[in-house]
Image (cartoon, helix red, strand yellow):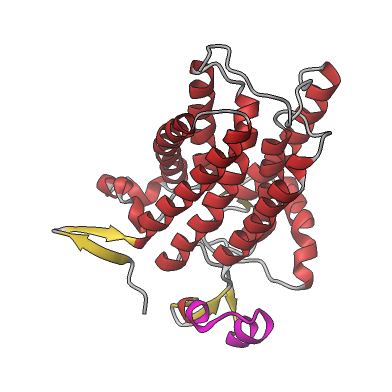
Amino acid sequence: MFSQIAFNIGPIPIHWYGIILATGAVAGLLLAIQEGKRFNIKPEFFMDLLLYGAVVAIICARIYYVAFQWDQYKDQPLKIFAIWEGGIAIYGALIGAVIAAVFLTRSRGYSFWRIADIAAPGLFAGQLIGRWGNFVNQEAYGGPVSEAFLRDKLHLPDFIVNRMFIQGEYHHPTFLYESVWNLVGLLLIILWLRRRSFVRAGEVFMSYLIWYSIGRFFIEGLRTDSLSFTGPDWLASFMNILWSPMELVFEWGAMTYGGNIRISQLVGILIIVACIIIIVVRRQTGAARERYLDPITSTKGY
């Protein structure tokens, strides 16, 4: 049996959730520092980026989640700060990280796109590790499945299968699906994409967004804790059609919070479309003249 608390420092419990998130952040930092060396960027810059980015990302991730779950917190406002109990949204974290990165890169004289490209693998690493915090907390899981599905079809080890037995049923380990999806994305960027001479500035970062959003769209449909809202029937039908290939193998996860449209699925689609448009427009207008492999310089001599 796993405990959510790793150890105590006096009366203060240290949760595995926080340790795992911190581990993911450090792994992402090390990847960025290593790649930054190729462009003669000081490690201190990426340390600052992590420091400011992580703080803003956690705040925005929590705000994003609480905003869509306000009924759960309005009568217990102190619970808003209990992030160790879960309840942060990755898209909110991405918004926060981008905001922090834009301000920091400009203050140091760097192009946001160039730095975002270097940071993209670190974002994948942080997410693939961070999802194991959901495993410890027994959250962000999918709909019910049989034990045989987990053991015989997925061939999962006992410690995962046992942890997916929640409230009398086994469930999809969607944290694992997303972790593996992020691992594949990380390897694609490191081993292939950023080595290609045709890749322009900003396109590694946008490829990260596209890859993550595709996986999140399909995995989200399996989850039972999706933030949702009630939208027009045509939009809900459109989302169902896009997800329908998954029905050949899986069933939709129940939408326990009401609504007919999963927010993360809709946001994912919008991100994919926006990134494709940005890539095309930047290439056609000449805004993407720099390539990923070109030298990076600071206009402020940092």
Q: Quadrant of residue 297?
A: top right
Q: Residue at x 65, y 51 (%)?
A: 186
Of the pair 184 and 35, the residue shown nearer to us: 35
Q: Position of residue 145 (x, y in %)?
A: 60, 79
> As drawn, is 34 to the left or to the right of 50?
right
Q: Nearer the viewer, residue 258 or 106?
A: 106
Residue at (48%, 23%) from the top-left corner?
Answer: 104
- Does the stretch in magenta take in 11? no
Q: Which residues are the magenta region?
A: 147-161
Left or right relative to 238: residue 217? left
Left or right: 190 in relation to 41: right
Q: Is residue 227 visible?
A: no
Q: Is residue 157 left or right of residue 187?
A: left
Above or below, comparing residue 183 to residue 109 in the picture: below
Q: Position of residue 17 (x, y in %)?
A: 38, 58
Q: Is residue 156 magenta?
A: yes
Q: Quadrant of the N terminus?
A: bottom left
Q: In the rendered view, would you say 233 is above or below 108? A: below
